[in-house]
Amino acid sequence: MSLWTRASFTTLPYEIHLLILTHVPSYDALINYISASHHLERILLSYPLTVFRALLNTELALFPPTKTAGRSLLIHALQQIHISHLAARPCPCKTCKPNQCRWKQQVHTLFTTTLHLRRGNAQDELTFWLSRVSSLPSSLPSSPLPPSIWAEMVDLHLTAIELAQTFTASSLPTITAHRLTSTRNTHLTTNPFTLIRGAPLAAILTASDLPISTTESTRILQAIYGLRLAIDLIRLGHAAGITIARLREVVWSAYDTLWQLEALVTVYAWLKASCNVMAIHGRPKREELKCVRHYRRRCTRFPADGQPSYDPTEALRSAHVDNIVFAEGLGGIWATGAAKRAGVARFSWGGWACEGVCVLREGLPEVGVLRKVLLPYEEGRGDDVIFGDGGGLEDYRFAWGVSAPWHGLRRVEGGVEAVERYVPVVRIADGRWAGFREGERCWEGGRLRVAWWVGERFDRRRGRREEKEVLRELAVWDDARLEGWGLLWPNNEGVRVGRI
């Protein structure tokens, strides 16, 4: 940019600068604009509500007809900063009751207000969270948006961008390798009743080489912001004595459909699988950690032809990482500038237990809290979102979400109407990609649980491994890539099952 151009831009009336800021195409673009011009930053800090309202409308317009803030990176960022500041000033007393502790009362009130706002519109949420971050102790008095808060928002976004880039670079080759392996398996590609729908090898490679689309980038960033916020909400709420059911309600109610939660858990599963959190540090070799003892009791091995068909090793390792994140936050497995910590996994270990090589902090008041909120399906199954059992495949979050009384996506208290609006009957990771036919079967107590059944010729002995190959962290990718991978509309071609 020439000196004349810079001088011309800086001398423009502030109304022009404000007009520029109210027409940015995304939250990422807003941060880039502000970083490039101190003049635009001054305008933003003076008129944040005007700029943010326009940006929020733009964010929601990308996913019509949504009206909820779960699609907004901006509101996620404001919530994240306020939650972080609140969590940094916990009650020094660990045993006081909520009705006797001002800090715990503050957290309970915040959660109640959050749920109330989510039953309204996103603009009200924006106004509330902006007022909250502007009134933080570190903020300047009477400042619409303190510079320190904006600096935190920028740092938060830069971390998310770094994580998103690493996720993309790591995930695409992995998925490509699994799709190529599945397609080369002639047994699966020739059986019309199996999970895998064959795709030409060249098409798979071409789809993997496609540039990241705006839709994919938005979904990945939304998942990263949502994951970090969910983790901090769970940690804060648990410290204040809020129940697991209430925590689920607060986390789940931010989103339109379970597809968004699918993307959130996708990023978390990738982080858990790729982070380096294991290190030998002198523990007694046979000492078991608390989380190992907890999950070992819930892990079952199912014999098949004299060989174990389910090994809980990965579930136990996953439990370690869950508890590290619960104890330390997302920073326990990811830090700014430390992409190497989310690179190639370096913990290839076998056996039933960790044997004392985990750096997990002991003394947690309760194990599995994070899992019970983010992954509320059967314990001991590792991180499988979908699990095959008895000829049917079930998504435990879906089954719980439809039938459980705490269902967080149900916007009307005590009501069951329009559940399908938030939990589509046909899920993208089931009917759309896997090609199961939908059915219901009676569960304990006469309760119906939705299942997607495969045909009688499905080789159940190979089921788990092949399910993982086809259902591998796909919620963030767009239709063009899925079609090239051979994972789009496997049965009823041309019939869309909904919007992510």
Image (spheres, rainbow, N blue to C red):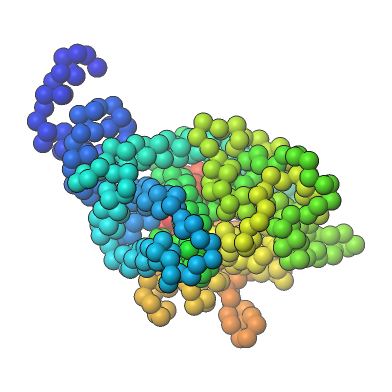
Asked if residue 401 shows in the view, the reply is no
Give the residue furthest to the bottom. 446
Could you tell me which residue is drawn at 20 percent across and 29 percent down? Answer: 39
- Residue 150 in the image: x percent, y percent? 31, 39
- Residue 393 in the image: x percent, y percent? 64, 66
Position of residue 373 relative to residue 450, above or below, is above
What is the tally of numbered marks visible in this picture? 0
Give the residue furthest to the top. 3
- Residue 459 in the image: x percent, y percent? 75, 61
Could you tell me which residue is drawn at 74 percent across and 54 percent down? Answer: 289
Occupied quadrant, residue 270: top right
Foreground pick, 490 / 41: 41
Residue 259 horizontal side relative to residue 72, left or right: right
Could you tell me which residue is drawn at 61 percent across and 35 percent down? Answer: 341
Position of residue 105 relative to residue 270, above or below, is below
Position of residue 116 relative to residue 51, above or below, is below
Q: Quadrant of the C terminus?
A: bottom left
Residue 263 horizontal side relative to residue 127, left or right: right
Could you tell me which residue is drawn at 85 percent across and 65 percent down? Answer: 303
Position of residue 357 relative to residue 367, above or below, is above
